[in-house]
Amino acid sequence: MSTVYRTQTARAEAGRAEAGRADVVRDGNAERLFRYRPGPDHRHYLICTRCGLSQAVDADLVEDWAERVARSSGFADVRHTLELSGVCPDCCRRRAAAT
């Protein structure tokens, strides 16, 4: 298993210019989950804390902000993480039906 995690971590840390890599998200227990990245840019996800469903979200504002901060600070190779979690619509309906 450690070889699998090392490989996936290397894919996630590979340069943004390379397509077909992986993105890392954390579940409710802070465990790493790897998601396939179909294009060259990493993605951000909204993750259900009950069932684990993940949905890619538009994060252009975050990406633009991170690029501006990097440029204005003079830092190079700036990386960022953004984790959004909540309860998906299906889990909300199941919870409401159970009460």
Image (cartoon, rainbow, N blue to C red):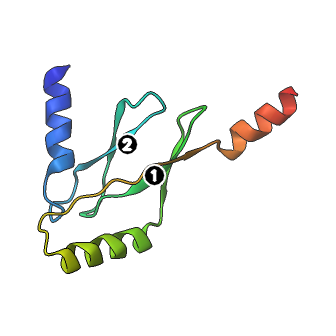
Q: CA distance from mark 2 to mark 1?
A: 8 Å
Residue 35 vertical position relative to residue 39 in the rendered view, above or below: above
State the mark number for residue 25.
2
Image position of 52 (left or right of 93): left
Identified at 57% across, 35% down, the residue is 49
Residue 34 vertical position relative to residue 31 in the rendered view, above or below: below
Dividing the picture into quadrants, the one containing residue 70 is bottom left
Residue 62 vertical position relative to residue 55 in the rendered view, above or below: below
Identified at 14% across, 69% down, the residue is 75
Count of numbered marks: 2
Tag 1: amino acid: Tyr
Dividing the picture into quadrants, the one containing residue 15 is bottom left
Circle 2 Cα neighbour tier, 10 Å, few/some/many (<14 / 14–19 / ≥20): many
Quadrant for the C terminus in the image: top right
Q: Which residue is mark 1?
A: 45
x then y, percent, for residue 21: 22, 50
